[in-house]
């Protein structure tokens, strides 16, 4: 028997570092009865709630995963039973997070649903490496584009972005790296700057600064893999050999 309807929150966990979740998001997480979490969510966040039902519903390469339909059904099942359901997503729920489908399903069922934003991976990757996505006299705008469509093709928006003067950030593009490189080479110079950030904002973050000509070969040579963000056309600030990271400052003796 179903009881009164519960409540659903789509919650952004941030780009990887568990400390980058918002205060509102953390409060919501601690009040949840059920947490349905994705693959790129730091599992340290789950420790903030000792009593909630926690189910992994993310997608990892080579591992069987739940379909979006199955995730929707699971989310609605708990909400129908009166639970406070948190759908915990990496980055921001509204950026390539399939939030639209989940919002629509909840609305069809008459179940209240809210969204708590998070720091998207493209913002986290750029900020953690001190890469300005916009910069006076250099870049007046930026594009954020997926690296492939649902049917495994290069998006038309990516082709248009490659022709622009904007900074272009590509998410989920590593599998199609050579095709993406080819699209940019059709419009940019060989020495056009590209930065690749893997596992942004986490303890195992890695950065590769290269050129458009060497992008694929350098990624292979350095063993850079998913999850990674590609940033085309940016110019980071000059390195200061005396600078410290925030983590170095707060852990200094």
Image: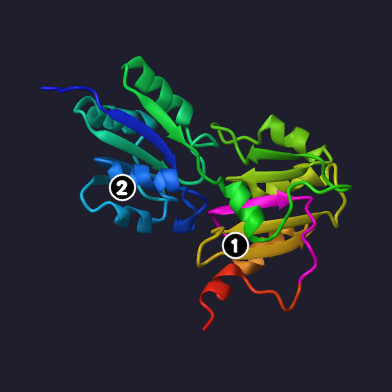
Which residue lies most toward the left here? 1
Q: Which residues fall within the magenta stretch?
A: 225-239
Q: Is residue 183 left or right of residue 170?
A: right
Residue 124, position as x, y percentages in the image: 59, 52
Left or right, 17 with reference to 179: left
* Front in this rendered view, residue 19 or 27: 27
Report x, y in % for residue 167: 76, 45
Residue displayed at 36% across by 59% down: 44
Other-residue count near label 1 (Cα within 10 Å), few / some / many at <14 / 14–19 / ≥20: some
Secondary element under disc 2, as helix, strand or loop, is helix
Residue 242 position, x and y percent, is 72, 79
Compared with 132, 141 (above or below) is above
- Looking at the picture, tell me which residue is in the foreground, 177 or 132: 132
Is residue 113 found left or right of 16 in the rendered image? left
Res 59 seen here: no
Residue underneath mark 2: 30
Q: How is the image coloured?
A: rainbow
Residue 7, picture quadrant:
top left
Q: CA distance from mark 1 to mark 2?
A: 35 Å
Which residue is outermost to the bottom? Answer: 253
- Is there a contact, CB below 8 Å, between mark 1 and mark 2? no
Q: Main secondary structure of the magenta part?
A: loop
Above-or-below relation of 137 to 194: above
228 within the magenta span: yes
- Mark whose residue sits in front, 1 or 2: 2
Q: Is residue 42 magenta?
A: no
Q: Could you tell me which residue is drawn at 75 percent across and 55 percent down?
A: 194
Residue at (60% x, 45% y) in the render: 171
Q: Which residue matches tag 1? A: 224
């Amino acid at each position: 028997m179903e009881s009164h309807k519960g409540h659903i929150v789509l919650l952004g966990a941030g780009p990887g570092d568990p400390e980058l979740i918002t205060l509102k998001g953390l409060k919501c997480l601690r009040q949840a009865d059920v947490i349905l979490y994705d693959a790129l969510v730091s599992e340290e966040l789950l420790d903030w709630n000792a009593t909630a039902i926690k189910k992994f519903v993310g997608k990892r390469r080579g591992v069987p995963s739940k379909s979006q339909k199955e995730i929707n059904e699971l989310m609605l099942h708990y909400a129908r039973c009166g639970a406070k359901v948190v759908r915990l997503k990496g980055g921001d729920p509204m950026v390539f997070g399939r939030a639209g489908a989940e919002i629509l399903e909840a609305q069809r069922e008459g179940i209240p649903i809210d969204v708590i934003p998070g720091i998207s991976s493209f913002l986290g990757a750029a900020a953690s490496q001190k890469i300005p996505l916009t910069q006076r006299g250099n870049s007046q705008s930026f594009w954020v584009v997926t690296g492939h469509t649902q049917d495994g093709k290069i998006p038309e928006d990516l082709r248009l972005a490659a022709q622009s003067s904007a900074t272009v950030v590509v998410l989920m593009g590593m599998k199609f790296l050579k095709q993406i490189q080819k699209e940019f080479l059709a419009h940019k110079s060989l020495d056009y700057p590209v930065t690749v950030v893997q596992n942004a904002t986490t303890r195992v973050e890695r950065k590769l600064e290269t050129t458009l000509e060497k992008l694929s070969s350098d990624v292979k040579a350095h063993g850079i893999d998913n999850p990674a963000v590609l940033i085309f056309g940016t110019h980071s600030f000059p390195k200061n050999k005396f600078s410290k990271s925030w983590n170095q400052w707060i852990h200094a003796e």
